[in-house]
Amino acid sequence: MNSKNPVTIKDIAKKFKCSPSTVSRALNNHPLINEDTRRNIQDYAQKVGYQRNSVSLSLLNKKSATLGVIVPTLNHFHETAMIEGLQSVLQIHGYMLAICVTNESYLLEKQYIDKLLANRVEGVFLSISQETYDSGHYEHLDDMSRRNIPLIFIDREYDGVATSSITVDDYLGAFAATEHLIQRGCRRIAHLKGPNGLAVSEQRFRGYKECLAKYSLDFNEELIATTNFKAESAIVPMRRLMALSQPPDGVFGVNDYVSIAAMQVILGMGFSIPAQVAVIGFDNSPFSAYVNPSLSSVNRSSKILGEEAARLFLNNMEGNTQQKEHIILPPELIIRESTLT
């Protein structure tokens, strides 16, 4: 046998002077094949490095045991922890994950879905890109529905597609973060907002605004600055905020990255944290506990989000439910040095 070519069922059949169908049955533990024959064929197949052709099997069984996961980025702890949660549940059920990163691009999102469907994935977990929200084009998602391929929104969702989803209560988390700043005495609270139109950004913005209203604090447009979730996008806006004649005494950042960048600006301009400016973030990324001062944040249980999304898919595949489920996980406030009195 040429070592450069993969070993096939036909090669094994020649070795044992039997038909390829007999070898296939032996490799699949078919009860009609004698136990000794099965063991001998399986041992030989392992010895010569035989590997099943997963593409051929998927065509035969109409199953690929592959699931698509489409996320905007892998730069943040939140997305990687979600994927870890998905894998921890799905791997033991024999599924492999195909990870796709859109970098917030609608076209990439659409292309990935087309390619995943062409490769016969059994389902897709999707965190919608910013450009998809902006464009308003969701035809690629309708195509999945027509093909009856399970689609589960994870972390970010879109109400126009009737499918299951799992998110964290961003509104409640933002409300709790803002309330914490108010209760420690802050009265001019700035908000480093996420991209306009994105559900997570708008829900956190709404939580911030409605908490101010609850405590009869004025909403001030000059205290709002828009970021793109990346640390560097907070630097110039934070400098502007701290240069105001009345700078903020509290800052709520849309995520931990912009909040930590904000802290560096605040400290660099000679203000103290938390004595003069208290800062709180969102996501509870692991490094938030190790910056100086350590950052208060909102924990959204990223790994649990992935685990529960995986169970939604498995319940759907096993026929345990035909209903579209919408799970909203509760956030948790984590208090550290950046807001301690």
Image (tube, helix red, strand yellow):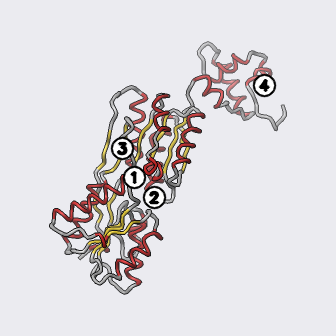
**Which residue is under mark 3?**
166
Q: Residue 77 carries which label?
A: 2
Residue 72, given in percent of the width and then of the height, sits at 49, 52
Please tell me which residue lies in front, 127 or 309.
127
**Which residue is under mark 1?**
302
- Circle 2 or circle 4, nearest the eye: 2
Residue 338, given in percent of the width and then of the height, sits at 32, 74
Q: Which mark is residue 75?
A: none
283 left or right of 86?
A: left
Q: How many labels does the image show?
A: 4
Q: Badge 3 local density, few (<14 within 10 Å), some, or many (20+)?
A: many
Amino acid beneath label 1? Ser
Task: Assign the N terminus to one quadrant of the image.
Answer: top right
7 left or right of 118?
A: right
Residue drawn 27% across the image and 77% down it: 249
Residue drawn 35% across the image and 80% down it: 242
Question: Given the current orientation, which residue lies at the most extreme right position?
Answer: 2
238 left or right of 188?
A: right
Tell me how far mark 2 sits from mark 4, CA to CA.
47 Å
- Circle 1 or circle 4, nearest the eye: 1
Q: Badge 4 local density, few (<14 within 10 Å), some, or many (20+)?
A: some
Amino acid beneath label 4? Asp
Please tell me which residue lies in front, 14 or 154.
154
**Which residue is under mark 4?**
11
Amino acid beneath label 2? Phe
Tell me how far mark 3 sits from mark 4, CA to CA.
48 Å
